[in-house]
Amino acid sequence: MNRSVLLSTSLSLNLLFLGIALVGWVAPNVSTTFNPDVDEPIIVPSARIHPLAVVNGSVTIGEMIFVAPGASIRGDEGQDIFVGDQSNVQDGVVIHGLETFEGDHELPENEVQVAGKSYSVYIGKRVSLAHQSQVHGPAKVGDDTFVGMQALVFRTELGDHVVVEPGAKLIGVKIASGRYMPALSLITTQAQADALPVITATYPYRNLNEGVVSVNIQLAKAGQPNQISR
């Protein structure tokens, strides 16, 4: 093999690896008994996936979404996973779901319904999933909702304009729109969920999500920066 061919091959491989690095690890799922169909993520061009993020399988990513370093959105077990326009998935966030299909039958107990369609995880518009939070399906997060750092949402549906403060854990409940969960609280019964406080004009974090969404839309719009050579 002559020098020009080697140079051309090397350049092609470098461009391939660079292309992979610039979009993160975006890949189809593998075929299994609980997910026999191989699906590729659907990602709108205006979304920005950091090179150190993972998006695979049955996942839809909407407009102007920033997926930060270390985030993992895995549609390889529960399916489908949907992330609505102008939402953000911050550092270390995990979005995953229990199996929604096994053998020859669907598992509706592991799904949520939105507008007549089944999802493993549904994230609405202008939602902030803050650092190291987890949303594990079956789960739904309504529009304009903030899920704080290291919070957990599992088998839970959150309404619109909800604030989940850092470290709060919600398991097996439905939260009405306009409520907040105090930091480090554990909500596991519907009675606890129904008793959560309402967001009022005096609540200090009532406008927190608006600022977080604005910042992350700008990060998405800015595009992928070039890595500095060292």
Image: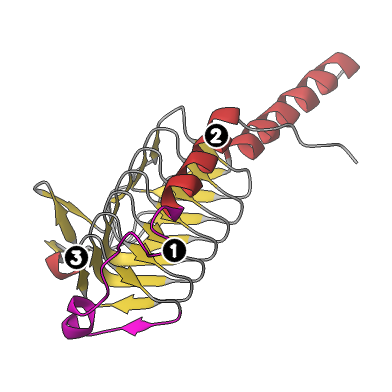
- Is residue 97 among what the camera can see? no
Residue 86 point in image, percent of width and height = 40, 39
Q: Residue at x 72, y 24 (%)?
A: 12
Q: In the figure, residue 160 lies in which quadrant?
A: bottom left
Secondary structure beneath dot 2 equals: helix
Q: CA distance from mark 2 to mark 1?
A: 24 Å
| Mark sitting earlier along the chain (2/1) | 1
| Mark sitting earlier along the chain (2/3) | 3
Magenta portion: prevailing SS class: loop
What amino acid type should be assigned to the residue bearing mark 1?
Pro
Residue 219 point in image, percent of width and height = 57, 37
Q: Residue at x 28, y 55 (%)?
A: 79
Residue 131 point in image, percent of width and height = 54, 61
| Mark sitting earlier along the chain (1/3) | 3
Q: CA distance from mark 1 to mark 3?
A: 19 Å
Relative height, residue 71 to residue 166 (above, below) = above
Q: Which mark is residue 66?
A: none
- Determine crowd level at label 1: few under 14, some 14-19, many 20+ residues with C-alpha closer than 10 A: few
How many discs appear?
A: 3
- Is residue 138 among what the camera can see? yes
Report which residue position mark 3 lands on: 176
Residue 49 lies in the magenta stretch: no
- Determine crowd level at label 3: few under 14, some 14-19, many 20+ residues with C-alpha closer than 10 A: some
Report which residue position mark 2 lands on: 218
Report which residue position mark 1 lands on: 204
Q: Is residue 45 left or right of residue 8?
A: left
